[in-house]
Image: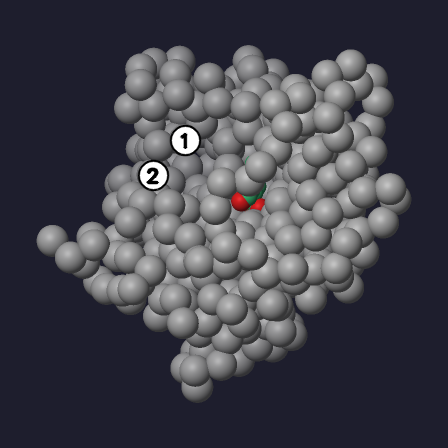
């Protein structure tokens, strides 16, 4: 079967797994002696980094994930760049790393997109952008000190669907004991949070055969390992209000805005695992994220029991909101909120 490659990213044949194909070049800047260097474009290749670098020992790192789409007229636009730029600054602050000024990051993202235009897949494929910040000071005695040196780069990767199987309904394990991240740190987009969630996600996948794990410590429904969580029905959309326990998804914000625009009553309040079980007797559940877009849940697993959602199919409200979101992202619907730039 034909493989998706950089030379042929638009093939509809079996695509490469999400995040495994990269552009040839990336933009980079380095922080040394208190200043960021001139932005360069360099080949995407192994980095030279000292084995004693701060990031390798003390996880001083954060990143972003956003997408650029090809519009029907051939133009390329980035979805909600301002939100991602702001969140990068917030994450950098939480992991005590210096970040390049927002206008420099914006310029780097735009330059990376411009250099990768030729590998941008047709919609619903996109160019996934991964701005990444790492602490590079060589010091294995700096557990209690911020890295004085850093590197920031913007990688690009042509992508299709994140969850293999595309639009199929997902199965989700409800984890009501463990937390995804340390309290107060959930809003940082940092590697350590993914490391701390990973063993639970792997256990769910291997032992229960689920796609993802929904973290609900002591019953408080928060988020999955890589997406935010919603309940929806014909009239209402329910999601947890923003607090420091989970990542403030840009897609979450977009879905909340769209749902309100489409006439749903948007309810942002804390809710429990029991509320999920009640809601799905008649309603739907879905996950949102830049990579996942808006994915329907077909089944929950909790305490060894299965709870089927909407007969195991993607529900009409999930479908409707997903189409509204993708329509704006890909330029087939009017950009009423000014999200593309
Ligand atoms: C843990 C986690 N929560 C939520 C999200 C959704 O955030 P966004 O919609 O900004 O991609 C992500 C990222 O995709 C994530 O990794």
- Side (left or right) of 304 relative to 178: left
Q: Would you say 120 lies left or right of 274 here?
A: left
The answer to whether mark 2 is within 8 Å of ligand 1 is no
Q: Position of residue 134 (x, y in %)?
A: 67, 37
Q: How many marks?
A: 2
Residue lying at 59% horizontally and 53% vertically, measured from the top left: 154
Q: Position of residue 139 (x, y in %)?
A: 75, 21
Residue situated in front as seen by the camera: 281 or 298 = 298
Q: Secondary structure at mark 2?
A: strand
Q: In the figure, 324 relative to 97: above or below?
A: below
Left or right: 43 in relation to 304: right
- Marking on residue 212: 1
Q: Earlier in the sequence, mark 1 or mark 2?
A: 2
Residue 297, quarter of picture: top left
Compare residues 211 and 112 and report the one nearer the observer: 112
Picture quarter with the C terminus? bottom right
The reply to whether residue 293 is in sight is no
Identify the residue position indicated by label 2 in the image.
170
- Ligand 1 image position (quadrant): top right
Which of 183/140 is in front? 140
Q: Residue furthest right?
A: 34
Residue 24 disc label: none
Decide: is 222 above or below 311.
Answer: above
Asked whether the residues under the numbered discs 1 and 2 touch, taking CB atoms below 8 Å apart as contact, a structural biologist would say: yes
């Amino acid at each position: 079967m034909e493989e998706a490659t950089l030379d042929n990213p638009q093939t509809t044949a079996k695509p490469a797994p999400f995040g495994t194909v990269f552009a040839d070049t990336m933009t980079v800047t380095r922080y040394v002696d208190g200043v960021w260097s001139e932005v360069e474009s360099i080949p995407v290749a192994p980095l030279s980094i000292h084995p004693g670098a701060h990031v390798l020992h003390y996880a001083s790192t954060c990143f972003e994930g956003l997408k650029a789409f090809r519009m029907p007229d051939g133009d390329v636009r980035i979805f909600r760049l301002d939100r991602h730029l702001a969140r990068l600054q917030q994450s950098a602050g939480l992991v005590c790393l210096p970040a390049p000024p927002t206008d420099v990051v914006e310029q780097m993202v735009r330059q990376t997109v411009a250099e990768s235009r030729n590998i941008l897949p047709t919609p619903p494929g996109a160019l996934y952008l991964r701005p990444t910040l790492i602490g590079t000071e060589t010091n294995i005695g700096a557990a209690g000190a911020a890295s004085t040196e850093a590197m920031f780069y913007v990688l690009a990767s042509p992508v299709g669907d994140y969850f293999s199987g595309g639009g199929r309904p997902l199965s989700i394990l409800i984890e009501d004991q463990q937390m995804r991240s340390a309290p107060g740190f959930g809003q940082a987009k940092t590697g350590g949070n993914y490391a701390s969630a990973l063993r639970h996600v792997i256990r769910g996948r291997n032992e229960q055969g689920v796609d993802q794990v929904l973290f609900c410590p002591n019953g408080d429904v928060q988020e999955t390992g890589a997406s935010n969580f919603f309940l929806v029905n014909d009239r209402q959309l329910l999601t947890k209000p923003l607090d420091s326990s989970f990542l403030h998804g840009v897609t979450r914000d977009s879905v909340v805005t769209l749902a309100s625009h489409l006439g749903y009553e948007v309810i942002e309040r804390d809710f429990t695992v029991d509320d999920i079980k009640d809601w799905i007797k008649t309603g739907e559940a879905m996950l949102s994220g830049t990579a996942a877009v808006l994915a329907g849940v077909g089944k929950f697993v909790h305490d060894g029991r299965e709870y089927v959602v909407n007969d195991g199919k993607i529900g009409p409200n999930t479908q409707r909101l997903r189409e509204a979101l993708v329509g704006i992202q890909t330029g087939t619907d009017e950009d009423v909120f000014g999200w593309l730039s």
